[in-house]
Amino acid sequence: MSLSSFLSSFLTVVHAEAPETAESVAVEEPAAEEEVVQAEEEAEEPEDFHPIIRDECKNSTKCATLTRHFEHCQEKVSAGEGYKGEDCVEELMMHCVDACAAPKLFSKLK
């Protein structure tokens, strides 16, 4: 009896797996792609209410005046009639729309 056979009778022998070949990897790829496609189909994205709610708030009576002012500024600047460097960032209109949309949006997320 050799020393290795004597030791193997007391110890468990663990063999490493064979290295993957290009052929075995190519066979496994389509199965992985099918799983990804199935997972994407199963996980449907919920509808994004944010743009819809923001548009409603822009046209609400509370924010309509600020929205019209912003749109007028955009038209003026697009036509080249604005001041040099004017970009029509209307923070008041954005704050009004955000304040209006936030409670409505969070109620949809529940």
Image (cartoon, rainbow, N blue to C red):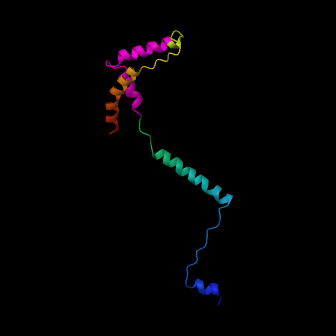
Q: Nearer the viewer, residue 80 or 57?
A: 80
Q: Which image quadrant: the C terminus?
A: top left
Residue found 53% across the figure and 51% down from its top:
35
Residue found 41% across the figure and 14% down from its top:
69
The percent position of residue 5, horizontal first and vertical second, equals 62, 85
Report the side of 95 relative to 21 (left or right): left
Q: Which image quadrant: the N terminus?
A: bottom right
Q: Is residue 62 magenta?
A: yes
- Give the overall secondary structure of the magenta segment: helix
Q: Is residue 54 magenta?
A: yes
Q: Tell which residue pokes out farthest to the bottom in this image.
A: 1
Tell me: residue 65, above or below residue 44. Answer: above
The percent position of residue 50, horizontal first and vertical second, equals 40, 31
Residue 66 sits in quarter: top left
Q: Tell which residue pokes out farthest to the top in this image.
A: 81
Residue found 36% across the figure and 17% down from its top:
64
Tell me: residue 85, above or below residue 52. Answer: above
The percent position of residue 22, horizontal first and vertical second, equals 68, 58
Tell me: residue 25, above or below residue 76. Answer: below
Residue found 58% across the figure and 74% down from its top:
14
What stretch of residues is rendered in magenta? Answer: 48-76
Q: How many marks?
A: 0
Residue 92 sits in quarter: top left
Q: Nearer the viewer, residue 17 or 2?
A: 2
Tell me: residue 20, above or below residue 40. Answer: below
Q: Tell which residue pokes out farthest to the right in this image.
A: 22
